[in-house]
Image (cartoon, rainbow, N blue to C red):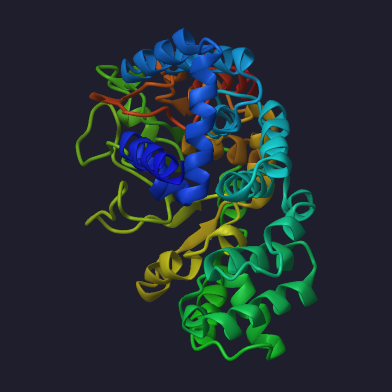
Amino acid sequence: MRRRRQDFRNQMLSTFPHMHRELGLEGGLRKIGQTVRWWMEGAPGRLSRKRYVRLYEQGRFEEAAQALRQALEATPDDMQLMLQVAGLSRFGLLPLEEALPLLRRVATEARGASARQALIRMINLLWERKGADAAMEWLPFLVRADETTARVLLRAAALAHEAGETAEAFDLVARVGRNDPSALPSMGYVDLILAVADDGAADLPQAGRARAVAAHLSRFEGSFTRMIAGTAGHVAVVANGPSLEGQGLGRAIDSHRLVIRFNNHAATPGSADQGERTNIWFRPTEFTHVPMRATPAPELMALTGSNVRNRYSNGLQVLEPYVQAELPVELVPKEVYTRLFAALDASPSAGLIGLDWAQQAVGRKLSPAQVFGYSLGRNTSAVSHYYGKRHTSSRPSRHNWQAEHRLFQSLISEVISA
């Protein structure tokens, strides 16, 4: 009998080898058992799952998300499917308020890796979308006494610090120091590094670098608002959509006292459509997808990313190159992200961040004559259209383009055909 059980176990693991790797032996066997029971029950939702895969591969992500949700309706107790459906919220394909109950259920009812994965996802979503205080409710479940992973403990410490739970943050850093002291020198949470160093809670060799980053950022804090105020609102906000193609608006753009552009913009000397000037350049902190340009630096680089100093585990590392190159940089304020997350239920694009922040700085809605290159109505979750090209991704964009289009129209003094 024991030999037959062992043979069955070996056969199932050879059929589902990934289960062993992802969930461990016991978790893998438990998942296999769930799969077998699902088939014996008639495989409810199987057609919806197949449709989801087919639609996803075709880049029809909205329809794929609907098919996945239908599959969950057919099998409402499938914890792995709950995690998959909840993951749609990261791409603006599921409202956050629908994702959170799914994650809560997996976190409290599942076991092992699934529960831990749900906790981490839920904390990250809440921290990004609703702030540190909202995420703190679930922190005790994540950092139980048996948690020894330095990466998780340090992220928990950064969260606790921003939420004002300083003592708890320092205790978590101390746990890392005891369990894995080699992890502390590479920690990149800027504000946590500063707090720990100032308190003397741990000896961090990167503290001097973090102070240099903080001092550099303080030099330019408020620059965006001051620059726009200095123009009396005579500012052009230029996105990268194809609506500028062949329009010859380059001179009109450059005639403004201040020109704001985004990411891999197409402004070049002599460009009839795009113009040449860039005073403020919105770009991500990393250089992977938006490299630095050989042209002279603009007057200000506005760095996108929600709550970089507190939430970014590599915040120190990605900000240091700007300090070393003495580049003028300002982080997009956390309040801008909070406002846009609430309005979009998804991550905002750089173009919408810049438009919203500019409107706040001007103190009124911008006119259509100040806004160029927004073609949000042409985008879907699969395809983003840019000046002279289109980008098709193998996975959904994190931007909810339909919601962005609606919000864009509300930020302009007159409706623009986009």
391 over 107 or under it: above or below: above
From the viewer's perspective, is residue 96 above or below residue 210? above
Q: Is residue 235 left or right of residue 133?
A: left
Quadrant the C terminus occupies: top left
What residue is shown at x 59% (from left), y 69% (from top)? 154
Residue 60 spot, x, y in % from top left: 39, 14
Name which quarter of the figure residue 140 lies in: bottom right
Q: Please state the total of marks drawn on the protein image.
A: 0
Query: Looking at the image, can residue 280 be seen?
Result: no
Name the side, left or right, on which 98 lies relative to 45: right
Q: Is residue 50 above or below residue 86?
A: above
Residue 317, horizontal then vertical, whole percent: 42, 69
Instruction: Identify which residue, 187 or 271, lies in the foreground.
Output: 187
User: Residue 191's x, y, as percent?
Assistant: 62, 71
* Rendered residue at 63%/43% (across/down): 125
Q: Nearer the viewer, residue 361 or 89?
A: 89
Closer to us: 397 or 271: 397
Q: Residue at x 35, y 18 (%)?
A: 59
Q: Nearer the viewer, residue 413 or 43?
A: 43
Q: Is residue 172 left or right of residue 316?
A: right
On the image, the x and y values in percent for residue 174 come to 66, 82
In the rendered view, does 62 fall on the left or right side of 198? left
| Res. 259 in view | yes
Q: Residue furthest front?
A: 1
